[in-house]
Image: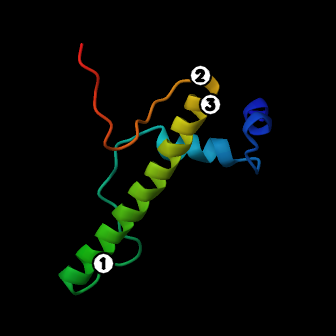
Amino acid sequence: MAMLKRKYGIPGHSTIGRWLRKYSSLSYGTYLSKGRPMKNKDHQRIKELEAALEKKEAELDAFKKFINIAERELKIKIVKKSGTKQSKK
């Protein structure tokens, strides 16, 4: 992991390990809310949805970084610009 940290300029001693724990399993539990449940079920649902959105945004950010690294290392284009037409075979 030290080689990856140096190669990609990843700070901290536990960043990669934390990423692996966080993103190695893409199944998510139902324990999205933190703390005690709220009395108002609508507020509780909003809290859960906000937590889920925050988690998905972090996941998307990580996937974008992985794709950028793959594109740079493999020298191929993975993500196409929006609006580009697919070639016919």
Percent x, y for residue 51? 38, 67
Vertical comparison of 59 with 79: above or below: below
Look at 59% across and 22% down and name the residue there: 74
Q: Secondary structure at mark 3?
A: helix
Which residue is at the front of the view, 49 or 63? 63
Where does label 2 land, which residue?
74
Residue at image location 78% in from the left, 30% down from the top: 3
Find residue 37 and name its label.
1
| Among the 4 quarters of the image, the one containing residue 73 | top right
The residue under the point 64% across, 42% down is 17
In contact (CB < 8 Å): disc 2 and disc 3: yes
Residue at which label 3 appears:
72
Three-letter amino acid code at disc 2?
Leu
- The image quadrant where one finds the N terminus is top right
Quarter of the image for residue 80 reads top left
**Residue 31 point in image, percent of width and height:** 34, 61
Query: How far, Cα to Cα, is label 2 from label 1?
Result: 47 Å
Left or right of residue 25: residue 70: right
**Mark 1 is on which residue type?**
Pro
User: What amino acid is found at the position of numbered circle 3 in the picture?
Assistant: Arg
Q: Position of residue 10 (x, y in %)?
A: 73, 45
Tell me: 61 left or right of 15: left
Work out whether 79 lies above or below 47: above
Element type at mark 2: helix
